[in-house]
Amino acid sequence: MTTTEVRADIRTRTRTVNVAVALQFLFALAYLIVPVAGLIFGADVQAAAEAELAGQGLSPTILADKGIRFDESGTALVIPVATAAIAVLLACLNLAGKRAGRILTFIFQPLFVIMDVLILFSQSSQVQYLQSLLGGGADAQAVIDAAYGAYPAWLLTITDGRGAFTVAASLVVIVLMLLPSGRK
């Protein structure tokens, strides 16, 4: 290879890796949307769900009795924050040109895809799950609607798009890192 070809190869590789790194940073940011929203709006969301249950003639404490919290706290913060931290670590390693970053990307990004698919599935079955916990005397859909109604509409739009974005970002990162220009 000539010097010009080496420089062109480095520029191409750098662009490919930089795009992958940018996607990893955005992925991390996207994963923090839900816990931050839960911390900010969680008490209002919890109160709205409890008020809906009270309006249905049920005890508002039934959610707490069943271990259901709409505000992000404790273990509910661990998975999204750890996922974001791992994504940032991968991005930093890849940005630094470390081989470990590429290897770990091939381990974790597919796991992130699987996790995102499981999250999307759990969100699609949340009404049925809540209904099974509350029993036949409650309208779980109304509780979910009341809870989500306490969030700003723009936030729900963002969180709905988050799932699709994080899956797509993970897949694009994998493809970019598989390209010859993504190799270190």
Image (tube, rainbow, N blue to C red):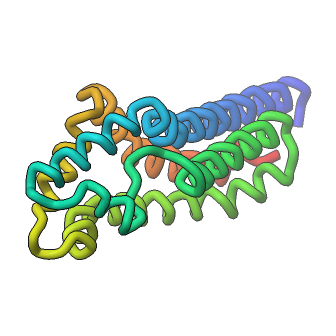
Residue 158 percent location from the top left of the image: 35, 33
Please state which of residues 138 and 126 is positioned toward the viewer in this rendering: 138
Please state which of residues 7 and 2 is positioned toward the viewer in this rendering: 7
Residue 96 appears left or right of 177 = right
Q: Is residue 136 visible?
A: yes
User: Looking at the image, how many numbered discs can be counted on the residues?
Assistant: 0
Taking the spot 79% from the left edge, 49% from the top edge, the residue there is 101
Please state which of residues 51 and 97 is positioned toward the viewer in this rendering: 51
Residue 64 appears left or right of 137 = right
Residue 109 percent location from the top left of the image: 61, 56
Quadrant assignment, res 63? bottom left
Please state which of residues 87 and 2 is positioned toward the viewer in this rendering: 87
Q: Is residue 175 visible?
A: no
Taking the spot 88% from the left edge, 37% from the top edge, the residue there is 1
Taking the spot 82% from the left edge, 45% from the top edge, the residue there is 184
Residue 120 appears left or right of 56 = right
Residue 121 appears left or right of 94 = left
Residue 51 percent location from the top left of the image: 20, 45
Taking the spot 17% from the left edge, 54% from the top edge, the residue there is 53
Question: Where 27 sits versus 180, above or below?
Answer: above
Quadrant assignment, res 136? bottom left
Residue 43 percent location from the top left of the image: 39, 37
Question: Where 41 sits versus 182, above or below?
Answer: above
